Image (cartoon, grey):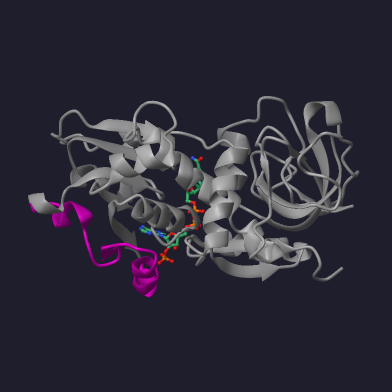
Amino acid sequence: MRGIIQPNTNSKELSFTTLPTPAINPSLGEHLIQVKTCAPCAGELLWPKNFPPPNPRELVPCPDVAGVIISGPEDSPFQPGDEVYARTNYIRPGNAREFTIGLTDELAHKPKTLSWVAAAAVPVSAETAWQILFIHAGIAGDAEADLGTAQDAWKGKRVLVTAASGGVGMWVVQLATLLGAEVVGTCGTANIALVQSLGAKEVLDYRSTNIREWAEDPVKKVDVVIDCIGRQSLEDAWWTVRDGGVVLSIFQPPKQVCPAEYTGTDVKDVFFVMEPVRRHLESITKLIELGTCRGMIDSVWPLEQYEEAFKRLDGGHARGKIVFDLSLNQ
Ligand SMILES: NC(=O)c1ccc[n+]([C@@H]2O[C@H](COP(=O)([O-])OP(=O)(O)OC[C@H]3O[C@@H](n4cnc5c(N)ncnc54)[C@H](OP(=O)(O)O)[C@@H]3O)[C@@H](O)[C@H]2O)c1
């Protein structure tokens, strides 16, 4: 089968190649999936070096997939012919290949309202945003919150989302708004209207606004920073949080860039790596089918054009997700 691999963990070079079709072990909940579309995640070619998988594996990129079940466990809720989507677990190869493997606990049925391309644009971004708001920010308690508890806890909280126009940021803005938070987002000039349309009350153009200066006015301070870009933006974001608040980043542990002269107190800092969880993706599916939330597609590519597609992703200015459509260029 056709596929893409990263031959070397120390290099971001990829190759287009022929791979053996994976064999499933149904007793482990494995399903063989014919891949219709798949999507890469920003920065993923650095993961094998920075976060080596626990067991060496073929480095196939693209954590997100949408496709058709070919075979699987007999008692599975996902039967041959079912249309599914998922962020598959990082411990296994990704999905830039014609056939892949998905587990019962990470798959969900594809939203009825979405095309194959639109479906592959959702899982890693939406599940990460979900896990930030319902678990890791800790606003609704130490354990995973249900919807009612999360709404009570987030109502009226001021939240700063950096890179609010990115794949994850867009979902954080939508879900936080849905939970009743007051969202401030940062993005570039061209994306201001987009971030407003997702629910943000205030949008700051990162090219013209210094968020440290913006937050000198105490009424601007936020309860929670949700950082999706890291480095300088995260360093500046430390100045925007109230004492007793939370600085969470999905890019790096926030303490790594806490300014030496920072004087805030009792601020909790959080970094985590998302895990694929079926019930989270099913909750997201419902919101998509209700028309409450949406993902966004930057561009669609045949697998063979992986170099151009990853170049666009690495540029850091995609407007939504980059998606590979395996029906193109066959
Ligand atoms: N920890 C986890 O579990 C986890 C999960 C998923 C993703 N991640 C990581 O999260 C990061 C974001 O992923 P993503 O898919 O959301 O990225 P993305 O979609 O590629 O982000 C691109 C967006 O970032 C905006 N942007 C670039 N520089 C900015 C800045 N200085 N301030 C504000 N916005 C800026 C761009 O807007 P303009 O075009 O206007 O500049 C563009 O809209 C990646 O590093 C990824 O690896 C981590």
| Quadrant of the rendered image containing residue 8 | top right
Left or right, 78 with reference to 63? right
Measuring 66% from the left and 69% from the top, which residue is drawn there? 300
| Residue 114, image x, y percentages | 64, 64
Up the image or down, 184 lies above or below 297; here it is above
- For the C terminus, the quadrant is bottom right
Q: Could you say which is closer to the camera, residue 60 or residue 95? A: 95
| Residue 258, image x, y percentages | 26, 36
| Quadrant of the rendered image containing residue 138 | top left
**Is-magenta flag for residue 241?**
no
- The magenta segment: 188-217
Left or right, 319 with reference to 161? right
Up the image or down, 211 lies above or below 143; here it is below
| Residue 115, image x, y percentages | 68, 66
| Residue 167, image x, y percentages | 50, 57
| Quadrant of the rendered image containing residue 277 | top right
**Is-magenta flag for residue 200?**
yes
Visible in this render: residue 43?
no
Up the image or down, 67 lies above or below 267; here it is below
Outermost front residue: 148
Left or right, 261 with reference to 231? left
Q: Could you say which is closer to the camera, residue 208 or residue 155? A: 155
Measuring 74% from the left and 48% from the top, which residue is drawn there? 95
